[in-house]
Protein backbone atom coordinates (compact mmCIF):
# COMPACT_ATOMS: atom_id res chain seq x y z
CA UNK A 1 0.00 0.00 0.00
CA UNK A 2 0.89 3.56 0.57
CA UNK A 3 3.64 2.78 3.10
CA UNK A 4 5.52 0.72 0.52
CA UNK A 5 5.21 3.59 -1.95
CA UNK A 6 6.55 6.08 0.60
CA UNK A 7 9.46 3.76 1.49
CA UNK A 8 10.51 3.24 -2.13
CA UNK A 9 10.04 6.83 -3.20
CA UNK A 10 11.85 8.44 -0.27
CA UNK A 11 15.35 8.41 -1.81
CA UNK A 12 15.18 10.81 -4.74
CA UNK A 13 18.20 12.56 -6.15
CA UNK A 14 17.03 13.00 -9.77
CA UNK A 15 14.52 15.24 -11.47
CA UNK A 16 11.31 13.89 -9.92
CA UNK A 17 10.74 14.73 -6.28
CA UNK A 18 9.60 12.09 -3.80
CA UNK A 19 6.22 13.82 -3.47
CA UNK A 20 5.69 13.85 -7.24
CA UNK A 21 6.64 10.18 -7.52
CA UNK A 22 4.32 9.22 -4.66
CA UNK A 23 1.49 11.18 -6.28
CA UNK A 24 2.07 9.30 -9.56
CA UNK A 25 1.82 5.93 -7.81
CA UNK A 26 -1.24 6.97 -5.80
CA UNK A 27 -2.91 8.04 -9.02
CA UNK A 28 -1.99 4.81 -10.84
CA UNK A 29 -3.29 2.54 -8.06
CA UNK A 30 -6.32 4.56 -6.95
CA UNK A 31 -9.44 2.47 -7.57
CA UNK A 32 -11.74 5.50 -7.65
CA UNK A 33 -9.84 7.25 -10.42
CA UNK A 34 -9.55 3.96 -12.35
CA UNK A 35 -13.26 3.90 -13.22
CA UNK A 36 -13.29 7.56 -14.26
CA UNK A 37 -10.12 7.07 -16.32
CA UNK A 38 -11.67 4.09 -18.10
CA UNK A 39 -14.70 6.16 -19.02
CA UNK A 40 -12.56 9.08 -20.17
CA UNK A 41 -10.29 6.87 -22.26
CA UNK A 42 -13.15 5.15 -24.07
CA UNK A 43 -13.39 7.89 -26.71
CA UNK A 44 -9.60 8.10 -27.13
CA UNK A 45 -9.49 4.31 -27.39
CA UNK A 46 -12.06 4.46 -30.19
CA UNK A 47 -9.93 7.06 -32.00
CA UNK A 48 -6.84 4.88 -31.65
CA UNK A 49 -8.73 1.80 -32.86
CA UNK A 50 -9.99 3.77 -35.88
CA UNK A 51 -6.42 4.93 -36.63
CA UNK A 52 -5.04 1.38 -36.42
CA UNK A 53 -7.88 0.01 -38.54
CA UNK A 54 -7.00 2.36 -41.40
CA UNK A 55 -3.20 2.12 -41.09
CA UNK A 56 -1.59 -0.35 -43.48
CA UNK A 57 1.94 -1.69 -43.78
CA UNK A 58 3.49 -1.71 -47.26
CA UNK A 59 2.64 -5.41 -47.79
CA UNK A 60 -1.02 -4.95 -46.82
CA UNK A 61 -1.81 -6.30 -43.33
CA UNK A 62 -3.29 -3.90 -40.81
CA UNK A 63 -1.11 -2.54 -38.01
CA UNK A 64 -3.72 -3.49 -35.41
CA UNK A 65 -3.29 -7.15 -36.30
CA UNK A 66 0.49 -6.99 -35.84
CA UNK A 67 0.91 -4.79 -32.79
CA UNK A 68 -0.04 -5.90 -29.31
CA UNK A 69 -0.31 -3.23 -26.67
CA UNK A 70 -1.91 -2.31 -23.40
CA UNK A 71 -5.42 -0.85 -23.37
CA UNK A 72 -5.65 2.92 -23.11
CA UNK A 73 -6.55 3.95 -19.58
CA UNK A 74 -5.13 0.74 -18.13
CA UNK A 75 -2.49 0.43 -15.43
CA UNK A 76 0.32 -0.47 -17.84
CA UNK A 77 -0.49 2.46 -20.14
CA UNK A 78 -0.44 4.77 -17.12
CA UNK A 79 2.92 3.42 -15.96
CA UNK A 80 4.35 3.84 -19.47
CA UNK A 81 3.03 7.41 -19.71
CA UNK A 82 4.44 8.26 -16.28
CA UNK A 83 7.84 6.81 -17.18
CA UNK A 84 7.87 8.65 -20.49
CA UNK A 85 7.52 11.94 -18.62
CA UNK A 86 10.46 11.23 -16.28
CA UNK A 87 13.78 12.90 -17.01
CA UNK A 88 16.17 10.18 -15.79
CA UNK A 89 16.37 6.41 -15.86
CA UNK A 90 16.88 6.35 -12.09
CA UNK A 91 13.47 8.04 -11.69
CA UNK A 92 11.97 5.43 -14.00
CA UNK A 93 13.60 2.61 -12.05
CA UNK A 94 12.34 4.02 -8.76
CA UNK A 95 8.79 4.21 -10.16
CA UNK A 96 9.06 0.64 -11.47
CA UNK A 97 10.17 -0.65 -8.06
CA UNK A 98 7.27 1.24 -6.51
CA UNK A 99 4.85 -0.38 -8.95
CA UNK A 100 6.26 -3.84 -8.13
CA UNK A 101 5.93 -3.17 -4.39
CA UNK A 102 2.34 -2.02 -4.89
CA UNK A 103 1.54 -5.17 -6.92
CA UNK A 104 3.02 -7.28 -4.10
CA UNK A 105 0.84 -5.40 -1.59
CA UNK A 106 -2.27 -6.13 -3.69
CA UNK A 107 -1.32 -9.83 -3.76
CA UNK A 108 -0.63 -10.04 -0.02
CA UNK A 109 -3.90 -8.27 0.88
CA UNK A 110 -5.96 -10.05 -1.84
CA UNK A 111 -7.02 -6.74 -3.35
CA UNK A 112 -7.67 -6.64 -7.12
CA UNK A 113 -5.29 -4.53 -9.17
CA UNK A 114 -7.02 -1.33 -10.29
CA UNK A 115 -7.15 -0.49 -14.01
CA UNK A 116 -6.71 -4.17 -14.91
CA UNK A 117 -9.95 -5.89 -15.94
CA UNK A 118 -10.95 -8.82 -13.71
CA UNK A 119 -11.29 -11.54 -16.34
CA UNK A 120 -11.03 -15.30 -16.07
CA UNK A 121 -8.67 -15.59 -19.02
CA UNK A 122 -6.01 -13.05 -20.08
CA UNK A 123 -6.73 -11.27 -23.36
CA UNK A 124 -4.15 -12.60 -25.86
CA UNK A 125 -4.69 -9.58 -28.09
CA UNK A 126 -2.87 -7.43 -25.52
CA UNK A 127 0.85 -7.30 -24.83
CA UNK A 128 2.43 -9.96 -22.65
CA UNK A 129 2.97 -7.66 -19.68
CA UNK A 130 -0.73 -6.72 -19.62
CA UNK A 131 -1.63 -10.41 -19.87
CA UNK A 132 0.56 -11.09 -16.84
CA UNK A 133 -1.22 -8.36 -14.88
CA UNK A 134 -4.56 -9.93 -15.87
CA UNK A 135 -3.29 -13.33 -14.75
CA UNK A 136 -2.18 -11.84 -11.42
CA UNK A 137 -5.68 -10.38 -11.00
CA UNK A 138 -7.16 -13.84 -11.73
CA UNK A 139 -4.88 -15.40 -9.11
CA UNK A 140 -5.83 -12.73 -6.58
CA UNK A 141 -9.54 -13.41 -7.20
CA UNK A 142 -9.08 -17.17 -6.78
CA UNK A 143 -6.99 -16.66 -3.66
CA UNK A 144 -9.66 -14.40 -2.18
CA UNK A 145 -12.35 -16.99 -2.99
CA UNK A 146 -10.26 -19.75 -1.39
CA UNK A 147 -9.65 -17.69 1.75
CA UNK A 148 -13.36 -16.80 1.98
CA UNK A 149 -14.45 -20.45 1.83
Image (cartoon, rainbow, N blue to C red):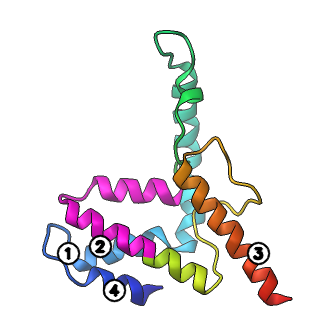
Residue occupying the point 46% across, 68% down: 28
- Front position in the image: 34 or 140: 140
**Can I make out residue 50 in this image?**
no
Q: Earlier in the sequence, mark 2 or mark 3?
A: 2
Q: Are marks 2 and 1 in contact (CB under 8 Å)?
A: yes
Q: Which residue is mark 3?
A: 142
Residue 83 lies in magenta, yes or no?
A: yes
Q: Mark 4 and mark 2: span between their CA atoms?
A: 9 Å
Q: Which of label 3 and label 1 is nearer to you?
A: 3
Q: Earlier in the sequence, mark 4 or mark 1?
A: 4
Q: Which residue is mark 2?
A: 21
Residue occupying the point 54% across, 56% down: 74
Q: Earlier in the sequence, mark 4 or mark 3?
A: 4
x and y, in percent, of residue 53 in the image: 58, 24
Q: Mark 4 and mark 1: span between their CA atoms?
A: 12 Å
Left or right: where 149 falls relative to 141 = right
Q: Quadrant of the C terminus?
A: bottom right
Residue occupying the point 41% across, 60% down: 79
Q: Mark 4 and mark 3: span between their CA atoms?
A: 29 Å
Q: What's the magenta region?
A: 74-100
Q: Which residue is mark 1?
A: 17
Around disc 4, counting alpha carbons within 10 Å, would you say few (fewer than 14), some (14 to 19), or many (20 or more)? some
x and y, in percent, of residue 37 in the image: 53, 59
Q: Which residue is mark 4?
A: 6
x and y, in percent, of residue 133 in the image: 58, 62
- Front position in the image: 53 or 139: 139
Amino acid sequence: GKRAIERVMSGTEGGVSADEAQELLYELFDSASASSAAAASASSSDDIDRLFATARLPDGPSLAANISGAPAGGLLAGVAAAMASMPTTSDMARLYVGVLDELAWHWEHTQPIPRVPPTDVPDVRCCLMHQQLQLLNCCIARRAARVAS
